[in-house]
Image (spheres, rainbow, N blue to C red):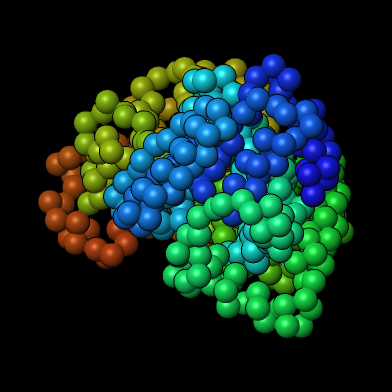
Amino acid sequence: MQSRFDSCLSRLLAGVPDAGEKPVLLAISGGIDSMCMAELFRHALSYPDFAVAHCNFCLRGEESDSDEAFVRSWAEKNNVPFHSRSFDTAAFAASGSVSIEMAARELRYRWFAALAREKGYCCVAVAHNANDNVETLFLNLLRGTGIRGIAGMEESGFVPCREEGSAPVPLIRPMLHFTRQQIEGYMVSRGIAHHDDSTNSGTEYRRNKIRNLVFPVFSSINPSFVKTVGREIGYFSDVCDIADDYFESHRKEVADTCDASGGCRISIRRLMSLRHWRYMLYRLLEPYGFNSSSVQSLARVLSESDTVAGKKFLSGKYELFTSSDRIVIRKTEMTPPGSGFPEWRLTGTAISESEPIMVIRGAGNYFFNGSSFSVKVCRRSDIHTLRQPAGVLVFDKDKADFPLLLRRWMPGDWIVPFGMKGRKKISDLFTDLKYGQIEKEQAVMLVRPPAFDALPANPAESGNADEPEHHVIAVAGTRIDESVKIDADTENVIMLTRNAGH
């Protein structure tokens, strides 16, 4: 076992910067796995310098203190530098509303990383073994961590819980390919002392339930199941690498600017053209915290539904919308811009500074609701044709003069589209234009500020209190109202040009 450990350790340390110059920090609990690692380090041919770090989680009273004393005694006996720290793990778990297991993990790795940086250790070594790896596989399957979860633990990586702005601390697992049975055989044959954690025999924690209730059943079916599953984990890891390559090779052609700090825009057409589009969708949504049911629901919409537009999904910090041709992910925290404009009442509905609103007081450039606008005023005689490019609207300045308001769509908005006689709800116009949820939220209404004395004091007096009606004189970049059209008497024209935002 020693020669195999030496070979593994040499290979792992070859990938750690400064491994030949700086000592290794060993995470030692006093249990059989970590004490085996400590002894193997002590007898390693290369005998790298190392120190010991012990966490006292204060969860088992005198037993926890006894573990700390035991590890300290071993370190002093073997002239190994010793570090220890006590944690109020129960209080930390309660304050963060996490399990004791997660709290202990957070506390120990945070301390290991800080200690390694402070004392100049090249890496942290932990004693996870082959059984731990198989247990992790099943825990990940139960949690639903996706394809990467079935690849198990990596032999090397970085300490989790990295502090903002700090360099990552390397982590190695030199015991990962040794089974617990092999470790026990080594320790017994050499009479090496260790402490047993009394909670390991219980079933309070999830990992212990798998270890003590599930694994005995597997062992009765296949006595070598840990080795068998361990071998399969290696294959799973290779498959994960292949899947990573596939994802990276297609990511940029399917999605624009995907990052967890901002958002993402996914082309539905390009996504659906891929053979493994469901996997691509899962990987694209994974950084934003959408759960498996949301991903499955969205995949079902894309593959089975005739109407893709208008779907909405939420995760903790992000929201996802679908339109007819794209999927948009964005942060949910949206701070409306202050307008610096007094409260306007639109047919009984108050729009104040807490609402997204912009006042157009004259010609100029404006930015509102994700789009940029340019407003110009010109003589009617300067316009040679009323047929304008897409996104450009022209209307009679005398019929709709400044100030004007830009705001988002509200239920009850209506317009008499140019060339028509009857009213049309903006919501129906959206349907005609095949707008999805994103387009609806990005739509911008141009309205006249009404006179306060022309408005009823009670919104219910304006008609239907549940859906008050608002006359819109233009939907920016799309339609103008019949009432503001240019005619033979028009002298001055307002030209509104909308440039689509991102």
Q: Decide which of 319, 441 is in the foreground and name it.
A: 319
* Residue 130 in view in this figure: no
Image quadrant where one finds the C terminus: top right
Vertical side of 459 occupied by 483: above or below: above
> What residue is at 46 percent from the left and 56 percent from the top?
101
Rendered residue at 46%/31% (across/down): 83
Query: Does 275 sit left or right of 87 as displayed?
Result: right
Left or right: 1, with 426 as reference point: right
Residue at image position (52%, 20%) is: 119
State the count of labels: 0
**Is 80 displayed left or right of 390 in the figure?**
left
The x and y percentages for residue 141 are 65, 66
Question: Residue at (59%, 47%) from the top-left corner?
Answer: 35
Q: Is residue 337 visible?
A: yes
Tell me which corner region of the image, top left, top right, bottom left or bottom right, holds residue 301.
Answer: bottom right
Of the pair 200 and 68, the residue shown nearer to us? 68
- x%, y% of residue 494? 49, 26
Q: Quadrant of residue 228?
A: bottom right
Residue 144 lies, in percent from the top left, at: 62, 64
- Place residue 26 in its image quadrant: top right
Q: How far across and down, in percent of the image, does residue 19 sit?
A: 71, 23
